[in-house]
Amino acid sequence: NDAYFNDVELEQEPQYTLQGHLIYNFSRGHWLSLNANFYFGGETEKNKIDSFDSQENSRFGITYSAPINRSNSIKLYASTGVITQAGSDFDTLGAVWQYIF
């Protein structure tokens, strides 16, 4: 971004992510998943001066899916920040109704 703010030039390094999932199938459409990720990088420079703001964050979550009938299922999920250097320090909890046609 060569017009960031007050003629400051902003550059950012790529941000990388690793993620993994362990899934256990109880029966058709009925499963449990453990999920984890780790992302890092994204350091910025302003006018070629290092901002020392690289990110290292990690999250962990769980998802459970159960069939209701042939066309409907419900998913319950939760996740939390495990390592939080910048942003991402939040928890989620939710439910999803899925209709397949």
Image (tube, rainbow, N blue to C red):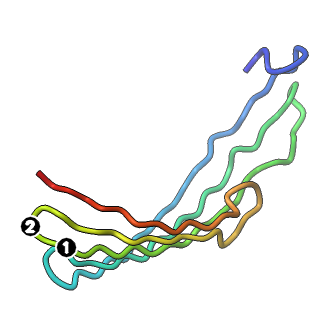
Callout 2: 10 Å neighbours few (<14), some, many (20+)?
Answer: few
In the picture as drawn, the residue positioned furthest to the bottom comes out as 26
Image quadrant where one finds the N terminus: top right
- Locate residue 57 relative to residue 99 in the image: left or right: right
Q: Which residue is drawn at 25% across and 76% down?
A: 66
Task: Please name whichever residue, 15 or 63, is drawn nearer the observer in this view of the structure.
Answer: 63
Task: Please name whichever residue, 47 or 65, is drawn nearer the observer in this view of the structure.
Answer: 65
Work out whether 53 lies above or below 81.
Answer: above
Per the image, label 1 sits on a secondary structure element best described as: strand
- Residue 85 image position (x, y, % from top left): 77, 61
| Whether label 2 touches label 1, CB < 8 Å | yes
- Residue 21 image position (x, y, % from top left): 40, 71
Task: Please name whichever residue, 32 or 67, is drawn nearer the observer in this view of the structure.
Answer: 67
How many numbered badges does the structure rendering display? 2
Q: Which residue is drawn at 30% across and 62% down?
A: 97
Work out whether 52 lies above or below 11.
Answer: below
- Locate residue 26 relative to residue 42 in the image: left or right: left
Distance Cα–Cα, label 2 vs label 1 = 7 Å
- Locate residue 72 relative to residue 15 in the image: left or right: left
- Locate residue 26 relative to residue 20 in the image: left or right: left
Q: Tell me which corner region of the image, top left, top right, bottom left or bottom right, holds residue 76.
A: bottom left
Callout 1: 10 Å neighbours few (<14), some, many (20+)?
Answer: some
**Which amino acid does the dot numbered 2 rest on?**
Arg
The dot on residue 70 is 2
Q: Tell me which corner region of the image, top left, top right, bottom left or bottom right, holds residue 32.
A: bottom left
Q: Residue at x 44, y 68 (%)?
A: 20
- Residue 23 image position (x, y, % from top left): 32, 77
* Circle 1 residue: 67
Per the image, label 2 sits on a secondary structure element best described as: loop
